[in-house]
Image (cartoon, grey):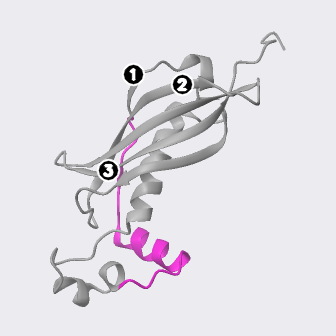
Amino acid sequence: MAGLYFEQFQEGQRFEHELTRTVTEADNMWFCGMTMNPQPLHIDREFASKAPFGQPLVNSLFTLGLMIGISVQDTTLGTTVGNLGMSDTRFPAPLFHGDTVHVTTEVASLRASRSKPDVGIVEFVHRAFKQDGTEVATCRRQAMMHRLPSDTSA
């Protein structure tokens, strides 16, 4: 698997994820539909044209999911047990249809699990930026990660 095990992370380690994604109007409409979010700022161009940004905003939860999803290939693919939580989630600037997102991840902290000897807790700080370098999302995420298998000869 491409993901790293708990022991392979280091505090301060930084990932510049190569995968990027241009967000489309269809992405935003499908996500709003699937999550039953009828907010007109996301789905009604006429309504949004009269709002402060003058155009529809990409749903912030889509932005959050995309940011974390982009990070998976380099960090947790196949080596995570699960997410424990997210905190300090912010959206400092809007994301619009047609913007291209790129993501960075930093390892903020590591600790062995107190109750499960085969896992450790990694705290990531994810940041998403659009094509002009404007930060559009950030969050701290705590993930429970598998430790390296004790027998790697199998």
Could you say whether the residue bearing mark 3 is in a helix, strand or loop?
Answer: strand
Above or below, 37 against 77 in this view is: below
Asked whether disc 1 touches disc 2, contact meaning CB atoms under 8 Å apart, the reply is: no
Mark 2 Cα-neighbour bin, 10 Å: few <14, some 14–19, many ≥20: some
- For the residue marked with disc 1, what is the amino acid? Gly
Please tell me whether residue 16 belongs to the stretch shown in magenta. Answer: no
Q: Residue at x 55, y 76 (%)?
A: 34
Q: Which mark is residue 36?
A: none
Looking at the image, residue 49 sits to the left or right of residue 139; the answer is left
Magenta residues (range): 17-39
Please state if 77 lies on the left or on the right of 149 as rendered.
left
Image quarter hosting the N terminus:
top right
**Amino acid on which disc 3 is placed:** Val
Label at residue 12: 1
Q: Which residue is mark 3?
A: 101
Viewer-side label of 1, 2: 2
Q: Earlier in the sequence, mark 3 or mark 1?
A: 1
Task: Residue 91: name its quadrant.
Answer: bottom left
* Residue ID for mark 2: 110
Mark 3 surroundings: few (<14), some (14-19) or many (≥20) residues within 10 A: many
